[in-house]
Amino acid sequence: MSNSTYPPLPINLLPDPASPDWMNKGDNAWQLTAATLVGLQSVPGLIILYGGAVKKKWAVNSAFMALYAFACVLVCWVGWGYHMSFGDTLIKGVPFWGRADVALNQNYLLKQAFSGKFPNATMVYFQFVFAAITLILIAGALLGRMNFYAWMLFVPLWLTFSYTIGAFSIWSPNGFLFKKGLIDYSGGFVIHLSSGVAGFTAAYWVGPRSNKDRERFPPNNILLMLTGAGLLWMGWTGFNGGDPYVVSVDASLAVLNTHVCTATSLLTWLLLDLIFFRKPSVIGAVQGMITGLVCITPAAGVVQGWAAILMGLCSGSIPWFTMMVVHKKSLLLQKVDDTMAVLHTHAIAGALGGILTGLFAHPRLCFLFSASYAQYVGLFYGFQMGVVHTGFRQLGIQLLGIFYIVVLNVVVTSLLCLLIQFIVPLRMSDEDMEIGDEAAHGEEAYAIWGQGEKLENSRYGYDIESSAKSRHAAGQIEMA
């Protein structure tokens, strides 16, 4: 019997020094694309969403908090954060924190990543954009009053002492919750529950906005806010579609489920606004969109389409209830000034998604994602398959993960805020809060008259004499 022969590979598929035999070009291309889509959610997505959603006098400060966090996280990430999140354990037998090390050497970056058929350089970039957006989401709770110098300290400290611990525990193959079988497909725990709890905790320590801003804080540009929201929604294609680390059928399912859940959640929130407030609110629709995106994140590729719709119904109604009803009746929730309501849109929606994952995770889809069969079984399928104990175990692990992330972020965020306030004030002065961007940065988002000239003799605003001359000259031109 003759040995069968296979035709030679096309030239573009042959391995070479720049394309090792372990690397899949398609997977690498998609991973870089997915990472860039997630990056665009932050820059410019959340930059312009925050910039448009706040009062005009805070547009520059809010956008700048996001831009600074993005840049700062990248430097910290390659300097020490990546290895603390995905490297070797810091102390043997302590499986929740990695050992700090740089991720800049080509000998390391060009080797195969711990998962997937692409190099470490791609994985470092992909994981960076997730770390960055987490800090930017925290900023949403602090808009309109946090001292920018305090924010500059908070970002690297929180990344180092909170994010890396949560990411290692849940996503690193060496993490204890990873080994227990926690399902967090793309960051419902690591990113959204963390940012929601940390943002709310930090808002408590920073203190509230001025009374005037708390009473009236209208968006300065709803259309700009919608543009940012649109980038956020579409960017979630890479957010959830990139986490299988392979261009697979599971990645396709994750993308479709993401958009189905989000649309369902948006419509549910809109319907509740119509029923109880008699007006369709575009801001409410954006909130419903965000809760849907967050809720599906821990489950995106491990649940069926009908489950994605059920999750959308829950994410459009339960956070709506906590925000519109519970929040208004709770003295504690009213005391803490959470500007963008990240407690409801990220912490509650993220925890909800984690619990629903424990109910609806399908064993076959979990196998496609993790290559481990029968270890991950949602409670719903545990009853169907006669393995109820396994289903309850999965739900219990999801609840354990929620408890762990909540405690971690309340404790670490509180300690960091207490530390920072010994160095610089956490909150801007009442005088500066009255003025906003001009006080914080000497800049403003929109020049109402003139060409944006600054005052020479006064600390804030325009040069009144120059502005008057400009208006007088303009008037002379119009008269002529």
Image (cartoon, rainbow, N blue to C red):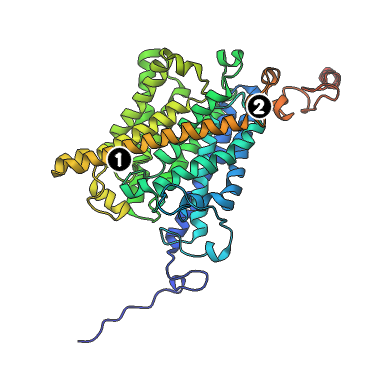
Which residue matches tag 2? 425
Q: Secondary structure at mark 2?
A: loop
- Given residues 25 and 425, the one toward you in this image is 425
- Given residues 318 and 183, the one toward you in this image is 183
The residue depicted at 68 percent of the width and 28 percent of the height is 445
Image disc number at residue 245: none
Q: Amino acid at mark 2?
A: Pro
Placement of 204 over or under 375, stated as above or below: above
Quadrant location, the N terminus: bottom left
Q: Position of residue 401 (x, y in %)?
A: 36, 38
Would residue 279 be found to the left or right of residue 467 on screen?
A: left
Q: Secondary structure at mark 1?
A: helix
- The CA distance from mark 1 to mark 2 is 39 Å
Q: Amino acid at mark 1?
A: Ile
Placement of 333 over or under 96, stated as above or below: above
The residue depicted at 66 percent of the width and 27 percent of the height is 425
The residue depicted at 66 percent of the width and 20 percent of the height is 433
Q: Position of residue 296 (x, y in %)?
A: 36, 38
Which residue matches tag 1? 397
- Given residues 284 and 187, the one toward you in this image is 187
Would residue 108 be found to the left or right of residue 6 on screen?
A: right
Quadrant location, the C terminus: top right
The residue depicted at 54 percent of the width and 32 percent of the height is 415
- Given residues 135 and 458, the one toward you in this image is 135
Would residue 470 be found to the left or right of residue 113 on screen?
A: right
